[in-house]
C-alpha cells in the first residue's frame, strides 16, 4: 500500500472495462480490491482480477448494479473502506453517495451535494451562469408546463433542443424545428426521461448547428482544482460519443485557455472533489463556447487525456477523495502530442448497429509503441446480453494528429475479436475519411456520413463474416 494512503480495501461498484481499469489503478496503489458481480458476471475479467468477489444479485441491473443496499452490504461484509462507482449505474446517484458516507465509507467521487446540484442539468446551467461560464441560450430551469416551454422556444428561436434535466447518454433529447414539432416532441422527451431516469423534468436550449463537442477534464480535492486540457468528442452517433481526441485540434491557444479557466472556475464554485468533466459546445463560426453540463464522475474517454498528460486520473481521484490532496499543481501538468480513442462495442455496423452478445472465440490485442487497449475480454469470454455493449477502448498516442490517425488505423488492423461482430470496421472507415483527416467534422456530421457509407459498411461486414 502506498505510504500515507488511508484507504486500504476498495470495492468497485461497477462492471466491464471500467471495473478492470479501477482494479489496475488500485493495484498500483497497493490496495486490496473487492469486485461486485451479478450472477451473469461471476466469470468476468474484473472478477478474475480482483482479490475478492461479492455476488450481489440476478443479471438485471435493477437487481444488482443499481441495488445500493446490496452493494453497501457487500462493502461492509468484505471489510472495504471505500467504494469506487466507475461510470454509469450509481456513479452519479447522490443518494448512493450519501449512503456510502453515512456507512462510514469513503465515496470515490464528489460529495452528494455536488452530485445533486450538477447532476440536475437545469440547475447546473444556473450554477455555471453564476460562475461566469457562458451557457447556451435557453430556459432558466426545469419547465413543467408545455405552453411555458413553447414560449421559451419561440423567444430564443427555432431550432431548439428539448433535453431531460436528469440522466445522459443521449436519452430524453429531441430537436424541434417548429412550434408544431415542439408540441409533439416535448411530451416524448419528458416520457423518455421519466422511464430512463425516474425524472420527467425537461428544459429547452437553442440548437447550435454544426457545433463541436469539447470538454475539459478536471480533478479536485474539495479545496483546489486543476485541469488537464481539452478533449474533443464531436464524432457521435445518435448523440453518443464513439471517437474522442485530445487535445481538440479545432481550438487555438487563446480559446483553449479561456475554456480551461472557465471549467476550473465552475469546479471551484462547487468545491469539487474527484475527477469530473465540464462539457461545452464550440461554435467554429463565431469562436464562442457554451456550457452544456458537468459529469461528476470519471468518463469513458479519460484515457486520451491520460495519454497526452502522463497522469493516471483514476489514481488521482482515489488519492484526492481519500483525503491525500491533489499532489500536483497546474504547472506540473504538461500536455504532449495527440491521442485518439475509439469505443469497441459488440454491435454490427452492417445491421444498423444491432447489439450482438456472444462468445469471444479469439482475442488478439494490438501491440506497438503508444498503443493501449482498455477492455474486459479474454478467449472464451461470453459477453452477456444484459448490459451496455461496450467491450473496450482502443487508444493511441503520436506526436501529432495525422500520425495518431495512422497509428489508430494500424492498431485496428492488429486487433482481432472473433466470435461476434464489433464496431472496429466503422473506425477503420472513419480513419480513412478525408473529412476526419482534415478535422472537418461536427456533432451531426457522422449521421450524414453513415447514411452515405451504409453500403460500404454492409459490404465490409459481409466480407468479415
Image: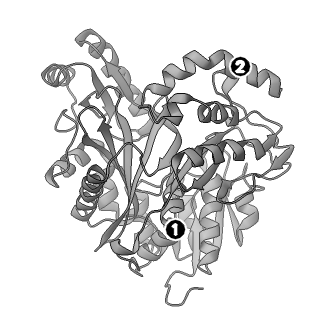
Residue 386 image offset from top left, x and y in percent: 66, 39
Residue 427 is labelled as: none
Q: Residue at x 74, y 19 (%)?
A: 459
Residue that badge 1 annotates = 310
Q: Is residue 322 left or right of residue 11?
A: left
Residue 242 image offset from top left, x and y in percent: 54, 38
Q: Is residue 415 visible?
A: no
Q: Is residue 121 left or right of residue 402?
A: left
Q: Residues within 10 Å of mark 2 (few under 14, many from 20)?
A: some
Residue 234 image offset from top left, x and y in percent: 44, 37
The quarter of the picture where the C terminus appears is top right
Q: Quick one: SS at disc 2?
A: helix
Q: Earlier in the sequence, mark 1 or mark 2?
A: 1
| Between marks 1 and 2 in the image, the one whose residue lies nearer the viewer | 1
Q: Quick one: SS at disc 1?
A: loop
Q: Quadrant location of residue 150?
A: top left
Q: Is residue 131 visible?
A: yes
Question: Residue placed farthest to the top in the image?
Answer: 180
Of 460 and 200, nearer the camera is: 460
User: Answer yes or no: do the residues labelled 1 and 2 have beta carbons within 8 Å?
Assistant: no
Residue that badge 2 annotates = 458
User: In the picture shown, does residue 75 fall above or below 355?
Assistant: below
Of 247 and 243, nearer the camera is: 247
Q: Quadrant location of residue 354?
A: top right
Q: Residue at x 25, y 48 (%)?
A: 124
Q: Residues within 10 Å of mark 1 (few under 14, many from 20)?
A: some
Amino acid at each position: 500500500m502506498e505510504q500515507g494512503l488511508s484507504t486500504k480495501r476498495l470495492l468497485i461498484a461497477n462492471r466491464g472495462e471500467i471495473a478492470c481499469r479501477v482494479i489496475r489503478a488500485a493495484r498500483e496503489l497497493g490496495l486490496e480490491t473487492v469486485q461486485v458481480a451479478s450472477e451473469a458476471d461471476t466469470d468476468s475479467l474484473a472478477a478474475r482480477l480482483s482479490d475478492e468477489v461479492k455476488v450481489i444479485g440476478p443479471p438485471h441491473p435493477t437487481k444488482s448494479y443499481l441495488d445500493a443496499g446490496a452493494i453497501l452490504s457487500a462493502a461492509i461484509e468484505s471489510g472495504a473502506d471505500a467504494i469506487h462507482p466507475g461510470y454509469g449505474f450509481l456513479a452519479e446517484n447522490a443518494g448512493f453517495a450519501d449512503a456510502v458516507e453515512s456507512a462510514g465509507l469513503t465515496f470515490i467521487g464528489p460529495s452528494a451535494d455536488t452530485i445533486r446540484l450538477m447532476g440536475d442539468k437545469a440547475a447546473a446551467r444556473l450554477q455555471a451562469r453564476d460562475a461566469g461560464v457562458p451557457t447556451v441560450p435557453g430556459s432558466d430551469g426545469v419547465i413543467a408546463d408545455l405552453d411555458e416551454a413553447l414560449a421559451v422556444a419561440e423567444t430564443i428561436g427555432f431550432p431548439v433542443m428539448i433535453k431531460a434535466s436528469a440522466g445522459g447518454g443521449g436519452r430524453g433529447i429531441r430537436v424541434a424545428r417548429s412550434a408544431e414539432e415542439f408540441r409533439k416532441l416535448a411530451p416524448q422527451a419528458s416520457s423518455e426521461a421519466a422511464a430512463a431516469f425516474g425524472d420527467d423534468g425537461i428544459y429547452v436550449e437553442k440548437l447550435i448547428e454544426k457545433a463541436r463537442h469539447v470538454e475539459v477534464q478536471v480533478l479536485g480535492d474539495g479545496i483546489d482544482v486543476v485541469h488537464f486540457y481539452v478533449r474533443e468528442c464531436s464524432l457521435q452517433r445518435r448523440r453518443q460519443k464513439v471517437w474522442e481526441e485530445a487535445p481538440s485540434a479545432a481550438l487555438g491557444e487563446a480559446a483553449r485557455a479561456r475554456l480551461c479557466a472557465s471549467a476550473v472556475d465552475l469546479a471551484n464554485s462547487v468545491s469539487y472533489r474527484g475527477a469530473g468533466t465540464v462539457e461545452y459546445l464550440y461554435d467554429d463560426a463565431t469562436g464562442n463556447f457554451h456550457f452544456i453540463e458537468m459529469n461528476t464522475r470519471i468518463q469513458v474517454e479519460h484515457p486520451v487525456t491520460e495519454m497526452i498528460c502522463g497522469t493516471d486520473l483514476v489514481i488521482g481521484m482515489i488519492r484526492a477523495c481519500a483525503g491525500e490532496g491533489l499532489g500536483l499543481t497546474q504547472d506540473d501538468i504538461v500536455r504532449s502530442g495527440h491521442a485518439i480513442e475509439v469505443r469497441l462495442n459488440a454491435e454490427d455496423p452492417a445491421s444498423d448497429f444491432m447489439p450482438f452478445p456472444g462468445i469471444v472465440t479469439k482475442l488478439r490485442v494490438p501491440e506497438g509503441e503508444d498503443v493501449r487497449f482498455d477492455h474486459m475480454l479474454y478467449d472464451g469470454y461470453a459477453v452477456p446480453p444484459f448490459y451496455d455493449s461496450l467491450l473496450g477502448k482502443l487508444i493511441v498516442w503520436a506526436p501529432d494528429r495525422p500520425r495518431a490517425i495512422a497509428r489508430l488505423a494500424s492498431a485496428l488492423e492488429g486487433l482481432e475479436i472473433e466470435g461476434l461482430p464489433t464496431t472496429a470496421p466503422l473506425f477503420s472507415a472513419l480513419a480513412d475519411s478525408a473529412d476526419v483527416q482534415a478535422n472537418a467534422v461536427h456533432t451531426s456530421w457522422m449521421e450524414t456520413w453513415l447514411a452515405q457509407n451504409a453500403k460500404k459498411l454492409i459490404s465490409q461486414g459481409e466480407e468479415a463474416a
